[in-house]
Image (tube, rainbow, N blue to C red):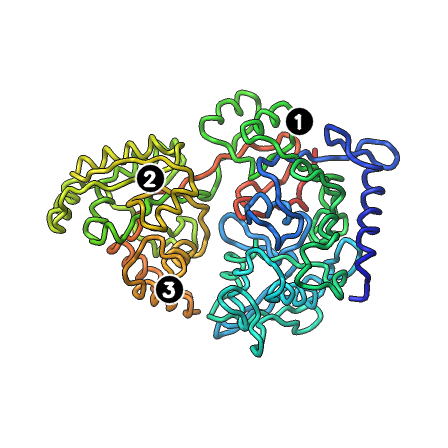
């Protein structure tokens, strides 16, 4: 850590001049020093990144993460099926009690200025980000480590659970038992190693204001070249990346309207677009008729639920009646056009814990009516809220529920207003979708907690006790049994109603080989394996 910050801009300027001879052309073509056209991948993205410093993203969006994924390095690569491969860490191992994990770092990893990445860089990164004076966005992700408070700030006088066991071994200590695999599946996309050797003497309070983040130096598979803020980002392939050199020279990421991504791919203006070349069922015929190969995803990328307000629908029998009245098969077909699977659980069918998931119940209007009678339902009307693109789905739900005698009025609002209204109790029901995770608690743990009781559950203890027991259990079979117990309890209480899991379609690049399309849903891409044909 003996370099001066003033070297950073000079280093970045050297990269820029050497890589692009003064800049990109209007179309994003990058010339080499000799004047010959370089091998360039043109990458479309529908939402701009809001910072080039990975811990300073206001949106915290997956689109920003896709940029950070290229410039900076993460501990692992997460596959769509929930398995893991090495990135900055070549292997990992947890302790028997589950409180600590060792990550053995790849000795070949280096920052873009040639400095080797060591465990100390990771420790210094996490130490800076947990400094209470550092204006980190998303710091709550650090709260899993011992020695931090619930906001992810280091607590004075307590031992911080991040240390270097040796030059290339990172030791993490957690507040509660956590396997390294669970930690990576949950948090891998949130953590990146920073070039702390370039940050010596930097004031944590003003860290985000440094010029370094205008021309960042990372250790990822691509190097920063130049940026047109909110419009275009040019990256150079890191030929020394520890997992291998990407099969291209430059990656030019261009922001464009989502509706134009497919047409730009068809026209040859793009080689690929984020996230995972996602494609709607309605647009698939156009893609195929234009010669673009359409791939069906292998794992679910969307989970739909019906949010319920436990204050206004306090009786679990009424909540179960709502589920039995819904024709999930019809609703799923309406939404996914055959690319979905109805669900009785938030546990993904591709998760290692899929055997613990409660199966989807078949529609039974008469059973729903019986539960309503038993509960003394008085015919009151409930408010069902949704976004405008799901108004047709809401209308079908309204019809389903009416057949069981449940009255519903529909309100259409934007997404932010919907979640705010569910949170403050304005609405009784709401249609929502999420990107599913492979862990059994990816959905329930964060939504059935004192800090995010969005379903207005009167007594969270039965949920939080079961969640804690699952987290504390390290034996796989015993843990699976506890997950099954929690899912059975959820099926009886139904604080929310699982609807279905949807599978994505991907527009395959006609020019780039080896793209792992489904895994892009985890905000990581295997660019070191990409080859521009």
**Residue 421, horizontal then vertical, whole percent:** 36, 46
Q: Do the residues labelled 2 and 3 touch (CB within 8 Å)?
A: no
Closer-to-camera residue (279/424): 424
Q: In which quarter of the image is the C terminus?
A: top right
Badge 1: few (under 14), some or many (20 or more) residues near its Cα, within 10 Å? some
**Residue 436, horizontal then vertical, whole percent:** 44, 48
Residue indicated by mark 1: 269
**Circle 3: element type:** helix
Residue indicated by mark 3: 467
| For marks 2 and 1 on the same chain, the one whose residue lies earlier in the sequence | 1
Closer-to-camera residue (255/341): 255
| For marks 1 and 3 on the same chain, the one whose residue lies earlier in the sequence | 1
**Left or right, 515 with reference to 428:** right
| For marks 2 and 3 on the same chain, the one whose residue lies earlier in the sequence | 2
The residue drawn where x is 78% and y is 60% is: 115
Q: Is residue 56 above or below residue 260?
A: below
Q: How far apart are marks 2 and 3 (CA)?
A: 29 Å
Q: Is residue 486 above or below residue 408?
A: below
Closer-to-camera residue (110/427): 427
Residue indicated by mark 2: 385
Q: Distance between the residues labelled 1 and 3?
A: 48 Å
């Amino acid at each position: 850590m003996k370099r001066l910050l003033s070297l950073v801009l000079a280093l970045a300027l050297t990269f820029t001049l050497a890589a692009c001879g003064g800049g990109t052309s209007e179309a994003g073509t990058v010339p080499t020093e000799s004047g010959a056209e370089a091998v360039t991948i043109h990458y479309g993205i529908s939402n701009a990144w809001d910072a080039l410093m990975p811990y300073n993203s206001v949106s915290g969006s997956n689109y920003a993460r896709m940029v950070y994924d290229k410039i900076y390095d993460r501990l692992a690569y997460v596959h769509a099926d929930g398995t893991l491969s090495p990135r900055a860490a070549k292997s990992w191992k947890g302790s028997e009690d589950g409180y600590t994990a060792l990550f053995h770092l790849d000795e070949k990893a280096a920052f873009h200025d040639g400095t080797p990445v060591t465990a100390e860089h990771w420790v210094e990164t996490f130490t800076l980000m947990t400094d209470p004076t550092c204006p980190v966005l998303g710091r709550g992700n650090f709260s899993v480590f011992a020695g931090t408070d619930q906001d992810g700030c280091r607590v004075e006088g307590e031992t911080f659970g991040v240390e270097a066991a040796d030059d290339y071994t990172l030791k993490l200590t957690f507040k509660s038992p956590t396997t390294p695999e669970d930690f990576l599946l949950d948090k891998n996309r949130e953590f990146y190693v920073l070039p702390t050797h370039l940050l010596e003497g930097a004031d944590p309070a003003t860290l985000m204001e440094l010029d370094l983040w205008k021309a960042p130096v990372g250790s990822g598979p691509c190097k920063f070249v130049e940026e047109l803020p909110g419009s275009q980002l040019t990256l150079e392939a890191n030929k020394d990346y520890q997992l291998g050199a990407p099969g291209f020279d430059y990656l030019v990421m261009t922001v464009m309207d989502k509706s134009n991504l497919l047409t730009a791919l068809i026209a040859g203006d793009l080689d690929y677009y984020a996230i995972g070349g996602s494609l709607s069922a309605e647009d698939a015929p156009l893609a195929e008729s234009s010669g673009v190969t359409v791939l069906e995803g292998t794992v679910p990328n969307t989970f739909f639920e019906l949010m319920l307000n436990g204050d206004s629908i306090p009786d679990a029998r009424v909540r179960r009646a709502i589920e039995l009245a819904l024709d999930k098969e019809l609703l799923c077909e309406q939404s996914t056009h055959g690319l979905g699977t109805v669900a009785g659980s938030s546990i993904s069918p591709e998760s290692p814990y899929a055997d613990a998931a409660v199966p989807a119940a078949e529609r039974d209007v008469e059973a729903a009516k019986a539960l309503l009678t038993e509960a003394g339902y008085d015919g009151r009307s409930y408010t069902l809220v949704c976004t405008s693109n799901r108004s047709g789905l809401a209308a079908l739900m309204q019809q389903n529920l009416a057949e069981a005698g449940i009255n519903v009025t529909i309100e259409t609002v934007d997404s932010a207003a919907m979640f705010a209204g569910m949170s403050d109790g304005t609405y009784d029901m709401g249609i929502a979708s999420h990107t599913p995770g492979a862990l059994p608690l990816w959905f329930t743990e964060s939504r059935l907690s004192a800090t995010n009781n969005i379903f207005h559950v009167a007594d969270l203890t039965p949920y939080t006790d079961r969640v804690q027991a699952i987290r504390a259990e390290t034996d796989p079979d015993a843990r699976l049994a506890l997950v099954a117990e929690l899912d059975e309890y959820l099926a009886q209480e139904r604080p929310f109603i699982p609807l279905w899991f949807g599978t994505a379609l991907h527009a395959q690049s006609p020019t780039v080989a080896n793209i792992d399309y489904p895994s892009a849903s985890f905000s990581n891409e295997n660019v070191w394996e990409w080859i521009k044909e």
